[in-house]
Image (tube, grey):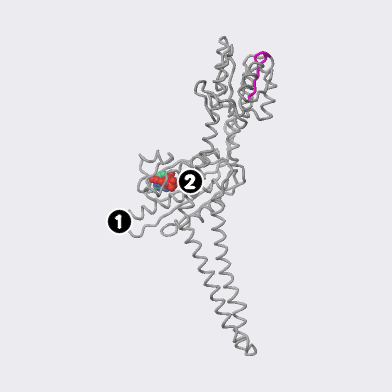
């Protein structure tokens, strides 16, 4: 989007930058004047004479910016802002105010207005205000798009890290499929002379045994191998799949953990045991693929910390150290306390007995690009992305760690998903813009 530095405003909008602005004012000449300014800038104006009309237009959607007068007969500007904020927390709202209405103006800002224009309205003042709003909106949109890109590229980087392990994992079952097929072909060679003399009772018995007992066992083993490969491939496909950010799938958390574990299995195998415990589980609302990305990150971090611990212990002459990662999940049922209903939560912990994290680093682990791994090994984005994904789900992720003993990541997710949290916030009506 182009910015005209003299006025700090967008040059007349080409169609892709065109926005729709709703003007709510009871004075016809103000509406007409603003409508002209808006259209001259290449945007579209929608006009309303009071709050109820404005509310209806906003509910129908398609409005990018609301400009409203405060004093109007019928539904006034304050009531309109209050009602809009109940269903739209993001809408930019500019209020039109006179010098004599400071108290109402402050109330409007408290309710969620973002900017103001003072009457009598001057062209430059007005254009600056709307262009500030659009520049902010376009920055936010770019930030959201950038975060999505970051999530996807971190995911792809993890697929890269995992690929050596995955190749190894696929090689194993492939070896036993191949061995069983080779064996079957050997047996078929041996069957031939026996089939030619099938009247011999000993030959008949041996053929029978090979066809009815040995072959089914070999076929079974080979099928298990193909199953294993299919699972690994579908795991990678699932993981690499670019989620559209919908957070309303019914998600079975056990299944997500199983997917994540099978993806990192190769890295976890040598000295590491992974145990899972589940209590009182039910499906939650969320995004399978994004949650899987979180769990894969946490498991890889745990595996790395254990590898480091194994090296430390070996240097001290202890060869027998066993790494443990314990994953547990439980639902904490909601409660009714003092008439306030708290929703059901899923609590997940990923606990390892790796190196642990020193106190000075503990506060930085969720920062983007914070890593203690060597260049080219860690990007330092893993936990930042986990934090963002859990936040998008309306949840929280925290860490507890003791240097030398191990680390636990604790995730709290609303069972009903991010929507439940949004609704709760709307009910509490705590504006973000005070
Ligand atoms: N389970 C853990 N045990 C010990 N240290 C950990 C653990 N998890 C994270 N850390 C520390 O937090 C840092 C940041 O982790 P994060 O996952 O964000 O990045 P990374 O693992 O270094 O790189 P990547 O972007 O590849 O994930 C790690 O470098 C490590 O020092
Ligand atoms: Mg990591």
Q: Position of residue 315 (x, y in %)?
A: 30, 56
Q: Can residue 343 be seen by looking at this rendering?
A: yes
At x 56%, y 52%, the residue is: 238
User: Residue 367's image quarter?
Assistant: top left
Q: Which residue is mark 2?
A: 154
Q: Position of residue 380 (x, y in %)?
A: 42, 44
Q: Please indicate whether residue 62 sits to the left or right of residue 358 in the image.
A: right
> CA gap, disc 1 to disc 2?
33 Å
**Disc nearest the viewer among 1 and 2:** 2
Q: Residues in magenta? A: 21-30
User: Residue 20's image quarter?
Assistant: top right
Q: Position of residue 57 (x, y in %)?
A: 68, 26
> Where is 97 relative to 146, above or below?
above
User: Ligand 1 within 8 A of label 2's CB?
Assistant: yes
Name the disc covering residue 315, or none: 1
Residue 27 covered by magenta stretch: yes
> Where is 182 relative to 351, above or below?
below
At x 48%, y 46%, the residue is: 154
Q: Please indicate whether residue 374 sits to the left or right of residue 244 in the image.
A: left
Along the line of sight, the residue nearer the viewer: 349 or 10: 10
Along the line of sight, the residue nearer the viewer: 52 or 33: 33
Name the disc covering residue 49, or none: none
Q: Can residue 434 be seen by looking at this rendering?
A: no
User: Ligand 1 within 8 A of label 1's CB?
Assistant: no
Residue 4 covered by magenta stretch: no
* Mark 1 element type: helix
């Amino acid at each position: 989007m182009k910015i005209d530095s003299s006025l700090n405003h967008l040059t007349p909008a080409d169609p892709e930058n065109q926005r729709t602005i709703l003007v709510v004012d009871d004075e016809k000449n103000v509406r007409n004047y603003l409508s002209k300014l808006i259209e001259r800038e290449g945007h579209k104006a929608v006009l309303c004479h009071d709050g109820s009309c404005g509310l209806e237009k906003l509910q129908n959607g398609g409005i990018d910016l609301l400009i409203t007068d405060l004093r109007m007969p019928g539904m006034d500007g304050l009531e309109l802002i209050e009602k809009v904020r109940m269903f739209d927390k993001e809408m930019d709202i500019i209020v039109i105010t006179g010098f004599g209405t400071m108290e109402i103006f402050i109330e409007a800002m408290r309710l969620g207005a973002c900017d103001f224009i003072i009457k009598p309205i001057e062209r430059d003042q007005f254009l600056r205000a709307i262009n500030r709003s659009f520049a902010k909106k376009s920055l936010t949109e770019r930030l959201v798009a950038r975060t999505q890109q970051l999530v996807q590229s971190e995911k792809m980087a993890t697929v890269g890290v995992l690929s050596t392990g995955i190749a190894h994992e696929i090689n194993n079952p492939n070896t036993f499929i191949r061995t069983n097929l080779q064996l079957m072909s050997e047996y078929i060679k041996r069957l031939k002379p026996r089939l030619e003399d099938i009247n011999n009772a000993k030959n008949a018995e041996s053929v029978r045994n090979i066809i009815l007992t040995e072959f089914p066992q070999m076929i079974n083993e080979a099928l298990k191998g193909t199953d294993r490969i299919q699972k690994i491939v579908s795991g990678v496909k699932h993981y690499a799949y670019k989620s559209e950010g919908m957070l309303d799938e019914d998600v079975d958390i056990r299944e997500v953990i199983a997917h994540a574990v099978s993806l990192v299995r190769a890295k976890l195998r040598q000295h590491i045991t992974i145990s899972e415990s589940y209590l009182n589980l039910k499906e939650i609302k969320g995004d399978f693929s994004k949650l899987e990305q979180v769990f894969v990150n946490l498991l890889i971090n745990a595996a790395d910390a254990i590898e480091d611990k194994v090296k430390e212990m070996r240097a001290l002459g202890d060869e027998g150290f066993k790494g443990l990662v314990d994953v547990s999940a439980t639902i904490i049922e909601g409660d009714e306390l003092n008439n306030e209903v708290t929703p059901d939560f899923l609590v997940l912990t990923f606990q390892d007995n790796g190196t642990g994290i020193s106190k000075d680093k503990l506060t930085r682990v969720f920062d983007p690009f914070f890593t203690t791994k060597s260049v080219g090994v860690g990007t330092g984005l893993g936990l930042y992305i986990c934090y963002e994904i859990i936040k998008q789900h309306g949840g929280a992720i925290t860490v507890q760690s003791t240097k030398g003993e191990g680390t636990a990541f604790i995730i709290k997710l609303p069972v009903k998903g991010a929507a439940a949290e949004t609704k709760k916030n709307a009910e509490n009506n705590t504006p973000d813009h005070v």
